[in-house]
Amino acid sequence: MENIKKFNSYYDFLKKEITQFHGPIKEYIFHLPSLFKLLTDILNNNKLSTDDRKLIFCALGYFVTPSDIIPEEIYGPAGYIDDIFLCSWVLKKLMKKYNTNFFLNYWDNENDPIDEVIEYCLEETSKDLNEKRNEIFEFVGIKDE
């Protein structure tokens, strides 16, 4: 139960962090807290395979790694681009396997369809990252399929 409180605290931190940003930032940045929460919440589903759990933990671990490919400390809100990319990539992969309905009970963003948000975030971050996508996959030790 203590770990859930830590995830909730980090979710609250992300929400606060994102709402405090000012200036020119990409719209997909605002989906960051919802993507993080979705990943943490679906871990409660017993139908997830061990390999799928590892993918989720990989994406969650990337959030808290201070020396990731685009560090927030250096780049501000742009530093979340790589985090959003990896979350979206993992979620899209899982959605192909489990289908969208599997995730709906865990989605906290009622105004935006989950599949559209994930696709939008993945497409836009992929454009912004270009070749850095490969660096992210190498950094976390997974292969882009």
Image: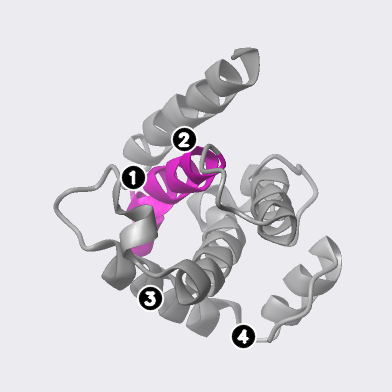
Q: Secondary structure at mark 2?
A: helix
Lower sequence index among marks 2 and 4: 2
Q: Is residue 49 left or right of residue 126?
A: right
| Label 3 residue SS | helix
Decide which of 19, 34 is in the foreground and name it.
34
Alpha carbons under labels 4 and 3: distance apart: 16 Å
Answer left or right for 128 relative to 66: left
Instruction: Indicate which disc, 4 or 3, sits on the residue closer to the N terminus.
Output: 3
The residue under label 4 is 130
The numbered mark, 2 or 3, whose residue comes first in the sequence reads: 2
Amino acid type of the residue tagged 4 in the rendering? Asn
Q: Residues within 10 Å of mark 4 (few under 14, many from 20)?
A: few
User: Which segment is the magenta one?
Assistant: 22-43
Taking depth in this image into account, of 24 and 6 the one nearest to the observer is 6
- Nearer the observer, 58 or 100: 100
> Dot 2 corresponds to which residue?
14
For label 1, the SS is: loop
Residue that appears at 39% across and 41% down: 18
Please name which of the two marks, 1 or 2, marks the residue nearer to the observer.
Answer: 2
Query: How far is mark 2 from mark 4, CA to CA?
Result: 25 Å
Residue drawn at x 28%, y 72% is: 116
The kind of secondary structure element at disc 4 is: loop
Q: Earlier in the sequence, mark 3 or mark 1?
A: 1
Please identify the residue farthest to the left as the structure is shown. 111
Q: Earlier in the sequence, mark 1 or mark 2?
A: 2
Tell me if I can see residue 72 in this picture.
yes
Magenta stretch, main secondary structure, is helix
